[in-house]
Image (cartoon, helix red, strand yellow):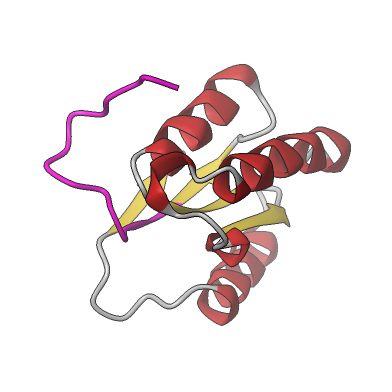
Amino acid sequence: MDAQLPFASLDGALAIVSGSAGGLGSALCEALVAQGCSVAHCDVHEGRLQDVHQRLLRLTSDGIGGIKDRAASVSAHVVDVADEASVARLAREVGETHSTKGRKLLLFN
């Protein structure tokens, strides 16, 4: 993917992307990965979420964005952003899955 996002550098940043099972959300996730960004993506639609997740894992294992063999830098979470408990669970899961200390943190909703 040739998309360039308007940020100085996303290499090593962590982005949380909600609505990732849709067209815009999945394209954003792919662009972020291509820029070297770790991505925790979520959606309420588990089947489509897993399809996107598998595509992102393939991108990371193919070395897109310079993060070859760092499949742990992409995580998928079933979340209903309209439910406070679901969002709190997402925050815990992201904290357990990804290191956040000293990183740029981005949220796309």
Q: Quadrant of residue 91?
A: bottom right
- Can I make out residue 37 in this image? no
Q: Is residue 72 above or below residue 67?
A: below
**Residue 11 lies in the magenta stretch:** yes
Q: How many marks?
A: 0
Would residue 92 appear left or right of 48 to someone viewing this image?
A: left
Residue 88 image offset from top left, x and y in percent: 59, 69
Q: Quadrant of residue 6?
A: top left
Q: Residue furthest left?
A: 8
Choose between 59 and 16: the one closer to the eye: 59
Residue 79 image offset from top left, x and y in percent: 70, 52
Quadrant where the N terminus lies? top left
- Can I make out residue 103 in this image? yes
**Residue 51 lies in the magenta stretch:** no
Residue 20 image offset from top left, x and y in percent: 61, 35
Residue at point 63% right, 73% down?
93
Residue at point 58% right, 40% down?
59
| Segment tinted magenta in the rendering | 1-15
Residue at point 84% right, 43% down?
46
